Amino acid sequence: MPDSPGMSSAILRKLTALVVPEGVLLLAVAVLLSWGALQEPLTTLARFYPYAVLAAGVLLAWRFHRSRMLYALVVLALADRAVLHLAGGASGGSTDAVFQTVAFLVPLNLLGLTLVSERGLLSPSALLRAFAIGAQVAAVLLLIRPGRVALGEPLNSAIIPEQWLGWTPVGQVPLLVFLAAFILLAARLVRNPNATGRGFLWALAASFLALNADRSGSDATIYFATGGLILVVATIEVSYLMAYRDGLTGLPARRALDETLARAGGRYTVAMVDVDHFKKFNDQYGHDVGDHVLRMVASKLRAISGGGHAFRYGGEEFALVFPGKTLDEALFYLEEIRSTIEDTRFTLRGRWRLRRRPDTGRPRRRRRKRITITVSIGAAEARDRTVRPDDVVRSADQALYRAKQAGRNRVET
């Protein structure tokens, strides 16, 4: 049976990855808006908060070529203006038609922007998205014209008993679109956790809260602006991960290692870890299998005990840093991780299978080949602040070279 604490820890990490930091930010805003004593300062905040978020979003979108985030911000800003100004200045029937149309279009746009790939700000696909948003604005403006209210009536169609949905002004059709978009975004996020998907999911939740807020106050504007802020935060997080996180293994990358060593100071131990015979393995089985090997090794290194931190150094080489640990103290954990990787059997599944069963009538088992993966490790210790991190890494590399020369699958210092 699987280890219960380990499984609980994995589930907790997955749940945390779904809500932090964007979900926590939205919860904090909801708590502040429910605090009556803050209504006056929040009303003042609502006068410039959306413009500050939009300006920050435009700057980030231009700097990092994030068209999806930019157009999502535009959608949220237009929705806010439509709900507060266009609907507020129209007749009763037109007001509801505009509101339901906005409630229908917002989740569709956020879902669509999530599903499309990032192509930059001036690509043909990005310009096509701008045209689509412009067409939607024209459609909303058309609803405001006298005699056009009937165009929005299908969005008020009753699918389930209306008394069940008395808690929300959002019509049943837009409500179903919101629900479908939320389920799709959540399913994609569970399957492939990433900051962009999480940002769009919680921006969708913020939009729904905005549409259910009191339109006579500033709550709707603050919720829409918070949805934009969530997207900005997600974009910053993506940019950070691109710089500091290795895309293949998920480990912190070389830049993160350099900053960790610069902050370490005093006594620490650095170990360089290299996958044995990796080039030969890569040539024999292919780069895809080689990538699986690197991910497997990275997963073991990530779980190292003794306070060690794992990094992807480059190629088939990794680094381990033990802050505050002497070389002798770290050796036990290095031997332990070397043995763990050696004991892990890497299974190669047969590439080809028979198209039909053999004459015996029994299915032929797929051929599997079990391969032992080993690593060589070289370690070095910094004893005081006068030692340069580059020198410690260089010493660890020299020890790694000795481990290779001595037959591999060993730890040298």
Image (cartoon, grey):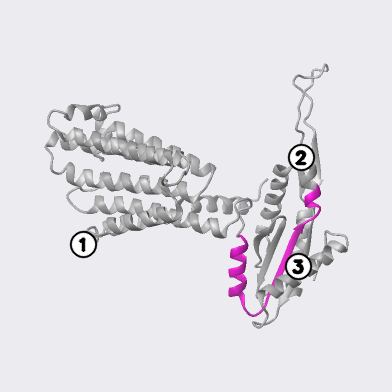
Disc 2 secondary structure class: strand
Q: Please tell me which residue lies in front, 346 or 167.
A: 346
Q: Earlier in the sequence, mark 1 or mark 3?
A: 1
The x and y percentages for residue 344 are 76, 50
In the figure, 100 relative to 238: above or below?
Answer: above
Q: Is residue 151 left or right of residue 243?
A: left
Q: Read off the residue under disc 2.
A: 348
- Report which residue position mark 1 lands on: 44
Instruction: Classify residue 4 as left or right of residue 61.
Output: right
Q: Position of residue 101 (x, y in %)?
A: 26, 35
Give the structural element (helix, strand or loop) at label 1.
Answer: helix
Residue 303 in sight here: no
Q: Position of residue 108 (x, y in %)?
A: 36, 36
Which of the 4 quarters of the picture holds residue 325? bottom right
How many C-alpha atoms fall within 10 Å of the one at disc 1: few (<14), some, or many (≥20)?
few
Q: Which mark is residue 397?
A: 3
Q: Nearer the viewer, residue 87 or 223?
A: 87
How crowded pointer 3 is (Cα within 10 Å; few <14, some 14-19, many 20+) is rated as many
The secondary structure type at the circle numbered 3 is helix
